Amino acid sequence: MNKKEKTNKIKNRFNIDFFEFCALVEACIPDSPIMRAMFWDKVIDLYYHELTVNERSRLYSWINRNPSFQYSLEKNNEGCIIFNARYNPDNQYKVTTNYIGEIKVNDCFKLNDRYYLSKTVSINEDYITNIEHIKMENNE
């Protein structure tokens, strides 16, 4: 077994249900040790795309009920602010860009008047041709 196969095997060997995932996310609310913070970043940038619209909305509600999360939000914790921007069902946008003739429609969230693809990647406003606020339906 080569290194890549071994890494993929390790990555995919843990299967947890949605409720276990929510509890794990809750345990990693910032401010937390570095390994938990790394998982929190994955919740924002990676796992968001693996969850259904309904699961995203439920996770957003679940985490926002947590007093530690609310405290971190009050203290302007960047990780919590970004989580809320990413998962808030009313903060989702389809942003069309035209970069050197290549037209793309991107799923984004808005933060500080910018449209983000991930925690650290925003779209240069010079290339934005259309912004559509999308209403997330919880019909899954």
Image (cartoon, rainbow, N blue to C red):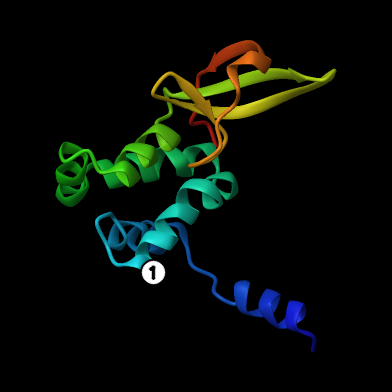
Q: How far across and down, in percent of the image, does residue 52 sit? A: 55, 43
Mark 1, other Cα within 10 Å: few <14 / some 14–19 / many ≥20: few
Amino acid type, mark 1: Met
Residue at image position (82%, 20%) is: 100
Dot 1: element: helix
Residue 123 placement: quadrant: top right
Image height of 10 relative to 79, above or below: below
Q: How many marks?
A: 1
Residue at image position (58%, 13%) is: 132
Seen as rendered, the residue at the extreme bottom is: 1
Image height of 87 relative to 2, above or below: above
Residue at image position (75%, 24%) is: 104
Q: Let me know if residue 55 appears in the view.
A: yes
> Which residue has dot 1 on it?
35
Q: Is residue 95 left or right of residue 80?
A: right
Image height of 99 relative to 138, above or below: above
Q: How far across and down, in percent of the image, does residue 45 sit? A: 53, 47
Quadrant (top left, top right, bottom left, bottom right) of the C terminus: top right
Q: Is residue 79 left or right of residue 134?
A: left
Residue 32 placement: quadrant: bottom left
